[in-house]
Image: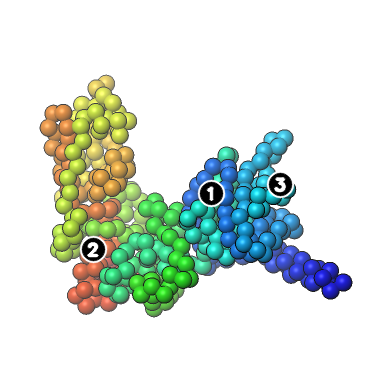
Amino acid sequence: MKLICAAMCFILVYVSFLTEAHSAIFKDSDLVRVRLKTLDGRIEISGQSLRFQNLENPFRPVAIPENTKAEVRLLEKSGKVFWALRVNGREQEHLFTNQFLLIQGEGLRIGAQALPERILLNHQKKSVDVVGVIPLEDYVVGVLASEMPLAWPLETLKAQAVAARSYARAVMEERKDKAYHLESSIMDQVFRHVLHEDENDPLIKKAVQAVRETQGQKLFAANHKVLKAFFHSDCGGTTTTAKNVWKSGVNTGTAIDSSCPLNPRAQWKLTLSKEELGRRLRVPNFLSLDLVHLGKERRVQAVRVAQADGINKNIPANEFRQLLGFQELRSSMFTLKDQGHSFVFEGQGYGHGVGLCQWGSRSLGKNGANYKNILKHYYPLARLK
């Protein structure tokens, strides 16, 4: 009898918890949904005290208290897609309907990758997005630990924390109705989940300190909205505006950094054969390339591609970089030499050049500037509050 009562109490508490899940995840402004990876329709996950639930239909929980290995797969029957859950290799499968499956537990992992304690699975046809659900400040720690060397000055880390938090908040508002707010890659901000045991590491402690000492602080644009605070590795000597790169965005001013050429990767060269360049640009029969600049701007605004059919095609510089590879054509501050069978790109800087320059902020931090000074330098038209 006691066991039955205990079980009933557990179910009531659990169902009460689950009925709040949708609002807690999709409406809580302090929870970031970040896409960690996209997999095919079969996922193997391990952890302790695992709990699985439909997000829209929270009355079918499966609670697994012991150490668990679970397999989740997509199952299609009669035109409907189901989540099929098998625990510890047992034959029985639990079926879940609806778009999302929420998994909670301790020590969650997919393979060797550590995950937050809450993840949301979202199926897209035959693939599955694995979305971490994370408190905003924890997310900023994970960005800081991924985007900037933690041995750099504390004030530099604090400036980066404010920029990352501001960017996240702005994008969360833009994508509030989407299954996830942010990518965990350079497409938004690089992020890795920081485990609790990692916080004993002195460098991780430094990241946590930088986030705590700036907690809640964000940059605001003149329109009183949270600023989508872009940042990059190396401006090459001067930053630019978002409009020059993406043809849209808030102008928060620009900065000059004479220290950036000190970056060991500041100067670079890329040589590509005409055939390889045509393959990457998806224009196999192009004739020549010309660089388009805006006024006296040192950065390339676009690249004009002359094709064999007589049609010229203008490719925006950021798109051109993406086609050639962001890691290879490191910035839009470059020159071009046509050597007949190959093209040589020579440039400086690393990244799009908008907002905070990480190498420049390192120099400012080493020279005694505090994080507010650093932010004012890179976002002179924005307000910190």
Question: Which of marks 1 and 2 precedes in the sequence?
Answer: 1
Q: Secondary structure at mark 3?
A: loop
Mark 2 and mark 3 residues within 8 Å of each other at the beta carbon: no
Q: Answer whether residue 285 is visible to the viewer in this image.
A: yes
As measured in the structure, the alpha-carbon distance from the residue carrying label 2 to the one carrying label 1 is: 33 Å
Q: Which residue is mark 3?
A: 91
How many residues crowd mark 2 within 10 Å: few (<14), some (14–19), many (20+)?
Answer: many
Quarter holding the C terminus is bottom left
Decide: few, some or many residues near mark 1? Use Cα within 10 Å; few <14, some 14-19, many ≥20: many
Residue 161 position by quadrant = bottom left
Q: Secondary structure at mark 2?
A: helix
The amino acid type of the residue labelled 3 equals: Glu
Q: What label sits on residue 129 in the rendered view?
A: 1
| Mark 1 to mark 3 CA distance (whole Å) | 25 Å
Separation of residues labelled 2 and 3 (CA atoms): 55 Å
Indicate left or right for 13 with 164 as reference.
right
Q: Is residue 221 visible?
A: no
Residue name at image x 52 percent, y 45 percent: 39
The x, y position of residue 295, in whole percent, is 18, 48
**Residue 181 image position (x, y, % from top left):** 49, 56
Q: Nearer the viewer, residue 375 or 324?
A: 324
Residue at left offset 71%, top offset 59%: 61
Q: Position of residue 81 (x, y in %)?
A: 67, 41
For label 2, the residue is 359
Mark 2–mark 1 CB contact (< 8 Å): no
Residue nearest the observer in this picture, 9 or 349: 9
Label 1: state its secondary structure: strand
Task: Answer with the quarter of the image where residue 184 lies.
Answer: bottom left
